Amino acid sequence: MNIYRSLNEITKYIEDHLEEDVSYVALARILGTNEYTMKRIFSLLTGIGLSEYIRKRRLSCAGFDLCGGKWKIIDLAVKYRYENATSFSRAFEHFHGVKPSEVDTDTALKNFPRIVFQEDVFIPTSMKYEIVSYPEFNLYGKGISTDNAHIAMDAPQFFYEFEKKYYDKYGSVPFGMITYDTEREESRCYYCLYDREAEGMERIYIPSSKWLKFQISSQNAKEIHDVSQQFYHEFLPSCKFNLRELPELEYYHDGVTDFLVAID
């Protein structure tokens, strides 16, 4: 499967349904995954959450409509699936920097174009993996909020500060964890975690699950990030696994890292 051809089909479907409710079921069917996996792939390969992409495309098109001078604000609100003119006007001003009532043919507006992917064939790098099962367990730690664009910098900085603060009491940090916001797909949280109770730290419950395990012969943050990107860009789109709505885990031990992704 050419993942980029399928993603172009997804953005084409969205273009054809900007004035309707976009069916995430239909989008997942195009990609051959469940909805959660489809949203994860789209977000990580584009750098923007699916719902945010649809919102920006609608507001961009609304700007062109208003410049044409033939639309009332309430009609555009209905056209682009807003509940009322007030919520549409608020979103329009936030996106374009000007109220829709103030737009004329000379107003400078923002354009957010459809994403189109290059479909060039490439030869992916092979990835060795195992499927493992773990019973439920608890982890204990703290986290930070970040996003797609900044996690590669934020995570190692937080890890360094966290381990420096707690090393004398609890030792080396054995686990890292990344959670995904299902409402704002570009948002992430990164956690540093211990596998035993730690005073003042949040308890994270991990239910029993099957996991894809990729062992990285390093604990270097860049190498871990590169494997994560390779997983989403190359491995996941070409495999038959659906993801579970569970965090990604990184298990640091014996000089290596196990990168773990939960699957159905």
Image (spheres, helix red, strand yellow):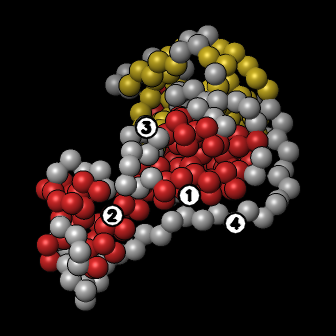
Q: In this picture, is 57 found above or below 167? A: below
Reading the image, the residue beneath label 1 is: 12
- Callout 4, which amino acid? Gln
Position of 86 with respect to 134 (left or right) is left
Q: Earlier in the sequence, mark 2 or mark 3?
A: 2
Label placed on residue 182: 3
Disc 2 to disc 3, C-alpha distance: 22 Å
Question: Residue at horizontal 60%, vertical 65%?
Answer: 116
Reading the image, the residue beneath label 2 is: 59
Q: Residues within 10 Å of mark 2 (few under 14, many from 20)?
A: many
Q: Quadrant of residue 40?
A: top right
Along the line of sight, the residue nearer the viewer: 179 or 170: 179
- Callout 3, which amino acid? Thr
Judge whether residue 227 can be spotted in this image. no
Q: Quadrant of residue 95?
A: bottom left
User: How far across and down, in percent of the image, does residue 109 sit?
Assistant: 31, 78
